[in-house]
Image: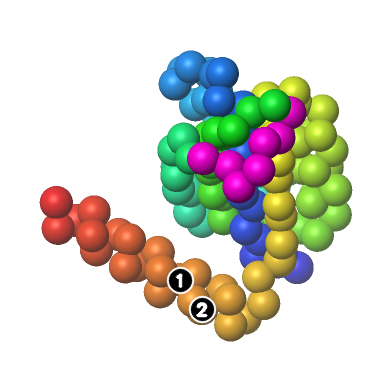
Amino acid sequence: MFNQYETVFIATPVLSEAQFKEVVAKFSNLVTENGGEILHQEDWGLKKLAYPIQKKSTGFYHLLEFKADPSFIETLEIMYRRDERIIRFLTFRLDKYAAEYSEKRRKKVQAKIEEK
């Protein structure tokens, strides 16, 4: 049985746009190659950090929402730790209420995109 997860990672700000897209593609492919299904992705862009991490005050934020087997999460987090371009990450399982809220939020974001 698959659970629904959200993961947000912060990549180092010294990356170029192409390098950041490569990082995003790497982790997206990792999810799909391990039998997961990507539900939604959001690129939050370059943001100021609340406190310096590795002497950096900004970072590229990216949200990845997916369904996967619970055993995959350990693999994903090991890959985050091994990749020197990732300075922070957080992964958590969504319960049924959070999943419903996330669904509503995705529809709202999609409606805004379609308006433009």
CA distance separating discs 2 and 1: 5 Å
Magenta-colored span: 48-54
In the shown orientation, is residue 25 left or right of residue 56? left
Q: Secondary structure at mark 2?
A: helix
- The amino acid type, in three-letter code, at marker 2 is Glu
> Where is residue 75 shown, x and y percent of the image?
83, 42
> Where is residue 10 shown, x and y percent of the image?
62, 38
Considering only vertical position in the picture, is 77 above or below 93? above
Considering only vertical position in the picture, is 91 above or below 77? below
- Residue beneath disc 1: 103
- Residue beneath disc 2: 100
State if disc 1 and disc 2 touch (CB < 8 Å).
Answer: yes
> Where is residue 30 shown, x and y percent of the image?
68, 36
Inspect this view and state whether residue 9 appears.
no
Q: Callout 2 environment at 10 Å: few (<14), some (14 to 19), or many (20+)?
A: few
In the shown orientation, is residue 42 left or right of residue 56? left
In which quadrant is the N terminus drawn? bottom right
In the shown orientation, is residue 71 left or right of residue 105? right
- The colour scheme used here is rainbow
> Does the segment drawn in magenta span residue 53?
yes
How many numbered callouts? Answer: 2
- The amino acid type, in three-letter code, at marker 1 is Glu
> Where, by quadrant of the figure, is residue 13 drawn?
top right
